[in-house]
Amino acid sequence: MKKPILLLLCLGAVLLGTWFLLSLPRQEVVDTTLTGYRFSPEGENRPSTLEIKGSYTSHRFSPEKDTFSPGYDGGFWLDGKKLSLMHVGFPDDEKDWIQGSAQDDQSETVDYVIYRELKTLVLLTTLEGETVLAVFPADSREEALSILENLPETQTEIQTFPTA
């Protein structure tokens, strides 16, 4: 009679421990450079780079939202210019895309659409005095256009000029 109770208690402890370990947040250091493509209203289209440094925290089985934090020295650099996308938080597990806006150090606006875990980024900002729309990751103009065309309907407001 004592063996089945002891076995059930051990099984319960193992399940509780497994649930606890799976519910811990997973934090990844992000230090990567993505290649992409950028468009301008004047029709100048060219390859672009985006450096990302910081940490990404994901919560698999928790109601807390996933976040990207640049820390003290991190952030986003578009073709060498630091952008002020400081902290990015995804609202909940149901939404993989987030759209937002931030101000950089020169009071210029940076609009963004970002896919969870920083897999896809679309940025609209001013670079070298001109408005640019940058898409990452993309190896070609066609790939960048495909990403823009396949954004969810709720995220297409970022496109402010034709890219064709």
Image: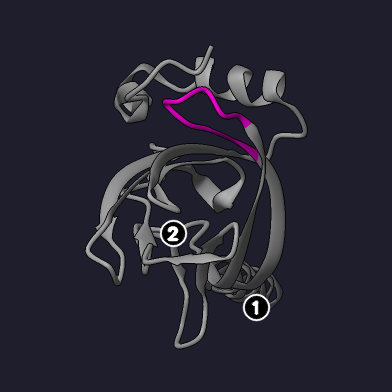
- Residue 3, position as x, y percentages in the image: 71, 75
Q: Which residue is mark 1?
A: 6
Apparent side of residue 130 relative to residue 14 in the rendered image (left or right): left
- Report which quarter residue 51 is drawn in: bottom right
Residue drawn at the location 42% of the way across and 26% of the way down: 41
- Give the residue type that dot 2 points to: Asp
Disc 2 element: loop
Q: How many marks?
A: 2
- Give the residue type that dot 1 points to: Leu
Q: Nearer the viewer, residue 119 or 23?
A: 119
Residue 66 is tagged as: 2
Q: Considering only vertical position in the picture, is 143 above or below 21?
A: above
Q: Considering only vertical position in the picture, is 87 above or below 134?
A: below
User: Start and end of the magenta stretch?
Assistant: 37-45
Residue drawn at the location 66% of the way across and 35% of the way down: 46
- Residue 87, position as x, y percentages in the image: 36, 67
Residue drawn at the location 34% of the way across and 57% of the way down: 63
Q: Residue furthest bottom?
A: 72
CB atoms of marks 2 and 1 within 8 Å:
no
Crowd rating for badge 1 (residues with CA inside 10 Å; few <14, some 14–19, many 20+): few
Predominant SS along the magenta part: loop
Crowd rating for badge 2 (residues with CA inside 10 Å; few <14, some 14–19, many 20+): many
- Residue 104, position as x, y percentages in the image: 31, 65
N-terminal of the pair, mark 2 or mark 1, is: 1
- Quadrant where the C terminus sits is top right
- Report which quarter residue 67 is drawn in: bottom left
Residue 59 is a magenta residue: no
- Quadrant where the N terminus sits is bottom right
Give the CA separation, mark 2 to mark 1.
Answer: 39 Å
